Image: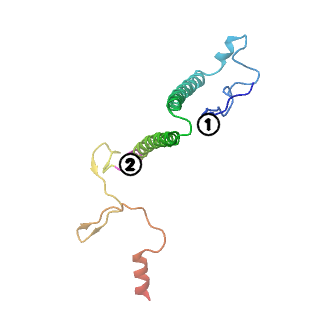
Amino acid sequence: MSPVMDETAGDLPVRDGYLYFWLPLSLSLSSADPQRLFRFPREHLEDLCLRLQEENSVLGQHTRTQEQRMSTRLIRLRQARPGSSAVKERDMEETIQELEARVAMLESQKAVLQNKLSLAKQHIMDIGGRTPYKFSKGVYVAHECKSMEVEGGVRRAAQTAPPRYGPTLEDTRAEMERL
């Protein structure tokens, strides 16, 4: 029995690994002892269940898109005459539609990643933030920052940029004055 191959044969999803990789070789789900499943932690079984549900939804979505693609191709092939340039134009239109769908998917992934990045930046800002008060005594007392210096009654701002490594402009000027 030879399978019929077409241009969509490469679109079929393929599972990379064995599904029940976490089960020992001596165990299987079809064993006669149902109590063996209770030996696994509940969190592990819940995680496996969620993974299977997610895989099922992804496969269902893939199946729907393949069915839609195949139905549109079938309709177009029925309407097209053999040897006409309309078939080539429709193939190009299909390619354009597929590329547009891919662009939309990549844009949505980009938006998700940008959202994650902004959340991570906000989290870093929340963690790294300093408070202007001391809490150790239970009384709010203004906290004098070590990096603030008083020169002639004017305070300099705390260093906001990370320290530079290597020679700075001030070091170079001081070296030139010494020479």
The amino acid beneath tag 1 is Glu
Circle 2 is placed at which residue position? Answer: 125
Left or right: 135 with respect to 113?
left
Asked if residue 126 is among those painted magenta in the image, a careful observer would answer yes
Range covered by the magenta-colored residues: 121-130
Tell me which label, 1 or 2, sits earlier in the chain: 1
The quarter of the rendered structure image containing the N terminus is: top right
The quadrant in which residue 112 appears is: top left
Q: Write the residue at 77% across / 21% down.
A: 26
The amino acid beneath tag 2 is Met
Asked if residue 88 is among those painted magenta in the image, a careful observer would answer no
Residue that lies at the very extreme toward the right in this rendered image = 26
Circle 1 is placed at which residue position? Answer: 7
For residue 154, above or below residue 63: below
In-front residue for pair 78/29: 78
The quarter of the rendered structure image containing the C terminus is: bottom left
- Percent of width and height locating residue 87: 52, 39
In-front residue for pair 7/31: 7
For residue 29, above or below residue 66: above
In-front residue for pair 146/53: 53
In-front residue for pair 108/168: 108
- Percent of width and height locating residue 115: 40, 42
